[in-house]
Amino acid sequence: DLSLRSFRLAQEIGSKQCQALASWNLGLIHIKLGDFARGLEWMKIRTEYDLEIGHPDAEKHAAYVASLQARIAEQES
């Protein structure tokens, strides 16, 4: 998978920005496949990075991750 290779390459070169972008894409792929928990794990990487650097979309991404967490909790109950 190209996104996973991108993430691993970003790790190797130490680019947190590229890791964040690749992780969000991996999260979206897992969400589309119905694996919300796995998608959430990947998307949290981007959200944490965005919050760390003060990205303008950080709150929007955090809200999306929170909605996924709520959806997962709903499915588990």
Image (cartoon, rainbow, N blue to C red):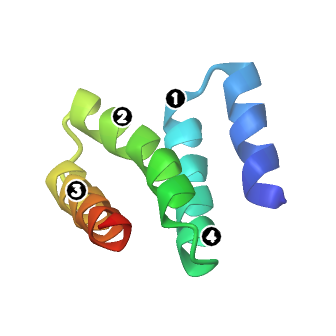
Report, in whole angstroms, how far the alpha carbon at label 2 lies from the one at label 4.
Answer: 19 Å
Which quadrant is home to the N terminus? bottom right
- Asked if marks 1 and 4 touch (Cβ < 8 Å), the reply is no
Q: Is residue 24 above or below residue 45?
A: below
Q: Amino acid at mark 4?
A: Ile
User: Residue, x 62% and y 70% (percent of image)?
Assistant: 29
Mark 3 burial class by Cα count in 10 Å: few <14, some 14-19, many 20+? few
Residue assigned mark 3: 57
Question: Which residue, given by chain and number where applicable, does mark 2 sit on?
Answer: 49
List x then y, in percent, for residue 35: 58, 67
Q: Rounded to the nearest whole Å, what is the CA distance between mark 1 and mark 4? A: 20 Å
Which quadrant: the C terminus?
bottom left
Q: Position of residue 43 (x, y in %)?
A: 44, 52
Q: Is residue 52 left or right of residue 25?
A: left
The amino acid type found where label 2 is placed reads Tyr
> What residue type is disc 3 on?
Asp
